[in-house]
Amino acid sequence: MTRIIDHPILGKLADREIITFQFDGNTYEAYENETIAAALLANGIRKLRVHEGSGTPRGIYCNIGHCMECRVTVNDQANVRACLTVVNKNMIVESGKQHPNIFKRMVEQR
Amino acid sequence: MSDVIVIGGGPAGLAGAIACASSGLNVTIVDEFIKPGGRLLGQLHQEPSGEWWNGIKESERLHQEARKLSVDIRCGVSVYNLEKENHLWNVYTNSGTLTAPFVLVATGAAEYPIPLPGWTLPGVMSIGAAQVMTNVHRVQVGKKGIIIGANILAFAILNELQLAGITVDRIVLPERNQISQKAGEPEEVMKSLLNAAHLAPSPLLRFGSRFMRRDWIRKIGLNFYPKNGVKVNGTPLQLRKAAIEIIGKDHVEGVRIADIDANGTIIAGSETIYEADFVCIAGGLYPLAELTAVAGCPFQYIPELGGHVPHHSETMETPLEGLFVAGNITGIESGKIAMAQGTTAGLSIAKHVGKGAGTIDEQLQQAVKNVRTVRQHAAIQFNPEINSGRSKMNQLWDDLYANNNREDSPKKIV
Ligand SMILES: Cc1cc2nc3c(=O)[nH]c(=O)nc-3n(C[C@H](O)[C@H](O)[C@H](O)COP(=O)(O)OP(=O)(O)OC[C@H]3O[C@@H](n4cnc5c(N)ncnc54)[C@H](O)[C@@H]3O)c2cc1C
Ligand code: FES
């Protein structure tokens, strides 16, 4: 997605330091002091995780910390809100994955 | 130890901290967002005077003022519990527990969701999420989107998206059901839009508001409502269409939309899929008040204020000793009012501590009056019945807590 560089009322985006971080093993660029969610969207990435049970895709919903839809794993810490967390240099971000459902598998195998 | 902990660094919390610190108190603000300002940060609208209300600038101004007064502002800190122990409040956060005799809870508002099939797809977000991404983070939420839900916040943010070069294809209603309720009934939506007509986003609504106060005229108006909608700033507002389903595989690809009659009933066979790469759901706002609930504060349901609100006085105290509230936690209103309430709460706390000798009562009275004045001149009003909602709470406070010497009145909870 595109960054809003020039804005008719808010003015031009200030120059900021560019850093790199990783998401699911790929390296991306981000602006210093922006959230993980904003940095990923600026790189065209909307999907932050899949539902633990169903495996269906999820992204941000509220963007201000209320809904928990944006939870990702940051430097091995699970369930971190991407919309409230500032992306750091060399941060390792992993999307939320589907969990194995042994009961479902047992039913399927019968 | 601080004298006061302020939970939430939005306009209410910042103004409250400034008033406390100006009276000589030690203040700590905790806020879970990346910077202070709260929802004020995303706000950008033109006042009737033509001037722009620039939330980022306003937030920076408040932030600087608080810093000058040595307010300790901690961002990225989430509060998850609030408890009284030995006359002190314990504020439990994700980075340790803070303790103080006074707490101001200014956690603001949250958005009502309107679930519909497909709403969990990446690219579907609340209207406020789009505002924050656009004005605070300066990243486009998409190329072409559809807004579901027609209310005052949706129109304000429609304009903000357009300013940032993002196309909003149309605004439609949610399908009428038990969750969407009135937001899915064209007549009810029309009524609420007409109530806000002084800031109506379209000349037709402004014109219509004069004629359409009567129910029967409104009905005719809706029956003849143009099928393709009325343009608001170039985007069709389609009060006779409802979103049935959001379509897409890994992200939003479009919305299935049907025609509806004046009551919101779907007209069979009228469904069409419109392409979009993002969808905003505008369900309205409610006070975010959980922390006062876990602290043990009594609540009242007042729809004009946006939902369940903690009992509080006009000077922003709650029945719990040392616990104060300000801003949207007390009822949904615009940023300037939150700020005025914050100042009131700050002065109220100063008075309880015994600061501001001689002049504090007058300052506090002035601040309460100022809240009413700012309310009268508000450019954005979320609920036209706000005054009646405020009166209900004041009456309740008077009945329950103000007259403590009455035999039958419950004592203040200590
Ligand atoms: C998404 C959204 C968009 C809005 N847009 C507009 C608009 O365009 N125009 C307008 O006039 N009004 C708007 N409003 C209404 C807005 O609530 C008020 O204008 C004003 O910002 C309220 O001020 P406040 O200080 O009460 O709360 P807020 O400004 O919401 O500030 C509350 C602060 O508390 C913090 N917080 C909440 N819970 C916790 C916790 N548990 N731990 C730590 N910190 C916490 C939040 O991070 C936030 O910074 C919007 C509201 C929302 C929710
Ligand atoms: S998007 Fe709702 S918590 Fe992050």
Image (cartoon, rainbow, N blue to C red):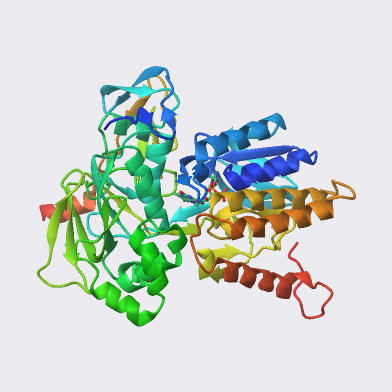
- Toward which corner of the image does residue A78 lie, by quadrant? top left
Camera sees residue A81: no
**Which is more toward the observer, B406 or B334?**
B334
Q: Is residue B409 above or below residue B31?
A: below
Q: In screen coordinates, is B352 left or right of B376? A: right
Q: Position of residue B293 (x, y in %)?
A: 58, 60
**Which is more toward the observer, B7 or B183?**
B183
Q: Assign the N terminus of chain A to one quadrant of the image.
A: top left
Q: How many marks?
A: 0
**Which is more toward the observer, B274 or B200?**
B200
Q: Is residue B288 above or below residue A58?
A: below
- The residue drawn where x is 38% and y is 56% is B201
- The residue drawn where x is 68% and y is 73% is B395
Q: Assign the C terminus of chain A to one quadrant of the image.
A: bottom left
Camera sees residue B162: yes
Q: Is residue B278 above or below residue B69?
A: below
Q: In screen coordinates, is B121 left or right of B274? A: right
Q: In screen coordinates, is A107 left or right of A76? A: left
- The residue drawn where x is 34% and y is 43% is B161
- The residue drawn where x is 69% and y is 34% is B71
Residue furthest right as drawn: B358
Q: In screen coordinates, is B5 left or right of A26? A: right
Q: Position of residue B247 (x, y in %)?
A: 17, 52
Q: Position of residue B268 (x, y in %)?
A: 12, 72
